Image (cartoon, helix red, strand yellow):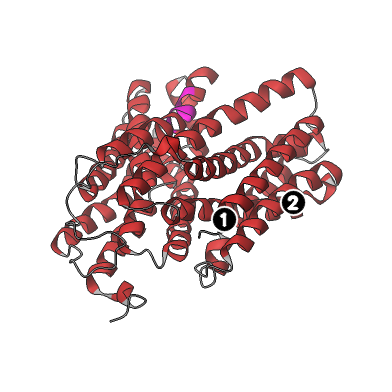
Amino acid sequence: MSAQTRIFTANNLALLAFILLLALNLRGPVTSFSPLIPEIAANLSLNGSQLGLITTIPLVCFALFALLTSKLVRHFDVYRILFVGTGLILLGMLCRAANGYSTLVVGVTLIGAGIAVGNTLLPSVLKRHFPLHIPSLTALYVLMMSIGGFVIASSSVPLSLWYVESNHTESGWRFALLCQASIVLLPVLAYFFIKQNKPTKHTQSDEPHHSDNKPVPPSKTSIWRSTTAWQVSGFLALNSFLNYVMVAWFPSILIESHFTQTTAGLNLGYMQLAGALPSLLLTPFINRKSVFPLLCLLATSTSTLSIFALFLLPKLAVIWAITFGFSSSLGFILGLSLVAIKSKDTLEAAELSGMAQLLGYSLAAIGPVTFGALHDQVGTWNPLLLILGLVAVMWSMIGWKVSRPNF
């Protein structure tokens, strides 16, 4: 059997099932909270600062626990770490459904830690077992992240309203959050199937002769000294920065341009929906080495043009929402692929992923706050859009550099 077809072996398909089911839970547990914020705030009498802390904690956890996870790979089985991370997500969702602010804080912290584990290690797992299919499988699991985020977030309010109407209580949000925890049971169950079908020594891998279920020996050089590592990390970090700033302030930008609140929110929805298109449309082509740099150029240049176009022609915001959502998501897929492609082995992939996630989510956490504070000082979004466009230009330059050979 050739390396190209080994992806279809029973062992690899079992592993893929675990990866994809885990990916279902790497976005939804965070995005599902936002639609319920008004209900939770009213039920628990929370102020703006408390709600701000709840929404910021996951991003901080994504950054900090990504670095910790990359170090744990030196000492523990990667699959056990992933299982523990999955368990943290499940425990966090159950804890979050309890009736209290302190349990909310604990819950979102556990969820953030668990998601950080998955975000960090999935590129490493693809590097180990599917080195010939990294971009296409990355696009597939990012699509699963989008599907999970949509399903969990869209079910939040209906589940809450149904419970309130059926039981005449004000705690429908707890029922909704509890129901969503059931999705995390899928990768938990799949894990035990994986343990019975561990990849054999014949599984495609770029690493010579070490047992797939044991820790990888420590690398002699620090990833933080690598120029390529900084380029990959910078690519993902700027992508996260641009995306989180746009998602946070896009409706406000449109309202300043005389859009109604409803229309502004609808355009933000178009942006999120467009984020699923790269995985749906480009998966068959994204694995081709000759196409990869061109896709990277497409992602970065389209994002840059979308931001400047929003400044020049805000009336066509629906177009720029779709193009930015598409290109930003494509950039995220390519960035995750670069983590595995540019790594020499599984351990380096985990360390590079931890470095990139640390920098990326740190910028993601401070980006919206910084731009919000600048807007308070300036009083208009136009100069800030120009600054954001210059950041996108930097992203384009890094992307073109890091995506070129050696691929």
Residue at image position (34%, 21%) is 102
Answer with mark 2 or mark 1, whichever residue precedes in sequence.
Answer: 2
Q: Which residue is mark 1?
A: 403
Can see residue 218? yes
Find residue 252 and report its image quarter.
top right
Query: Tag 1: residue type?
Result: Ser
Can see residue 47? no
SS under mark 1 = helix
Q: CA distance from mark 2 to mark 1?
A: 25 Å
Find residue 105 and report its image quarter.
top left
- Does residue 348 lie above or below 245 as drawn? below
Query: Tag 2: residue type?
Result: Trp
In this view, which residue lies farthest toward the front?
220
- Does residue 109 lie above or below 186 as drawn? above
Where residue 367 sits in the image (x, y, percent)?
60, 30
Where residue 398 sits in the image (x, y, percent)?
62, 46
Q: Quadrant of the N terminus?
A: bottom left
Q: Which residues are magenta?
A: 53-58
**Drawn side of residue 100 relative to residue 321, left or right:** left
